[in-house]
Image: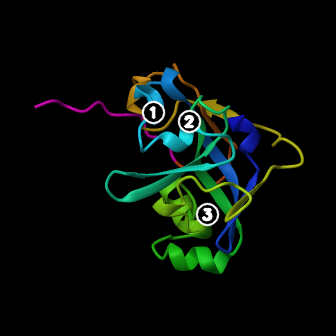
Amino acid sequence: MAPQLLGAVLHGRGVSVRLTEVEAYLGEQDPGSHAFRGRTRRTAVMFGPAGHLYVYFTYGMHVCANIVVGAEGEATAVLLRAGEVVAGLEAARSRRLTSKSDADLARGPARLCVALGIQLSDDGARLGELFRLDLPPHPVPEVATGPRTGVSGDGGSDAYPWRFWIPGDPTVSPYKRSVPKKRA
């Protein structure tokens, strides 16, 4: 399902973003997923029906969003990693004052959420209400795949090539390998 979201347009709060990069997460079977250890208050939305946003706070400062895509109870979701602002450019610019270029407005999962105005309180929002997703009429002509960015559960290997992006698109975020934490 994740590659099928490439080229889709997510609309919300006066901005529309064409998705250029996503990552897949397979719930309790996936050590990189928030749902790996089972259902919690934080991950409950992931275990619900498809078509909802799973929004979470990370690193004490960023909001990121996933679209729940699996059957109810499976906790399968796709992280929205990057995109191109295709409508509402002025609104996106006003939310992302530190962007050096328009290609940078939604380049990365936290920036994408800021550009679209996605907030932590949007966790559980059903697509079609406050936010709308329009799938592309045709699949993008070329899709690149590789390891997920900065996911410690992936073990720094290529065992989970579940990051998908449109090759050569300037809005795709740079790859960052997970760095294991040092224990004191």
Relative placement, left or right, of 60 versus 40 is left
Numbered range of the magenta stretch = 174-184
Disc 3 crowd rating (10 Å Cα; few below 14, some 14-19, many 20+) is: some
Write the residue at 71% across / 62% down: 129
Q: Earlier in the sequence, mark 2 or mark 3?
A: 2
Indicate which disc residue 47 carries.
2
123 and 2: which is toward the camera: 123
Please state which amino acid type lies under the numbered disc 3.
Ala
Residue 98 visible: yes
Query: For this rendering, which residue is in front, 113 or 86?
Result: 113
Q: Find residue 104 and report its horizontal and vertical position in percent.
A: 56, 63
On the image, the x and y values in percent for residue 91 come to: 61, 78
Residue drawn 74% across the image and 58% down it: 128
Q: Which mark is residue 39?
A: 1
Of marks 1 and 3, which one's residue comes earlier in the chain?
Answer: 1
Quarter location, residue 38 = top left
Where 89 falls versus 118 (above or below)? below
The x and y percentages for residue 184 are 10, 31
* Amino acid under disc 2: Phe
Which residue lies at the image location 44% right of the left edge and 27% below the top edge? Answer: 36
Mark number, residue 103: 3
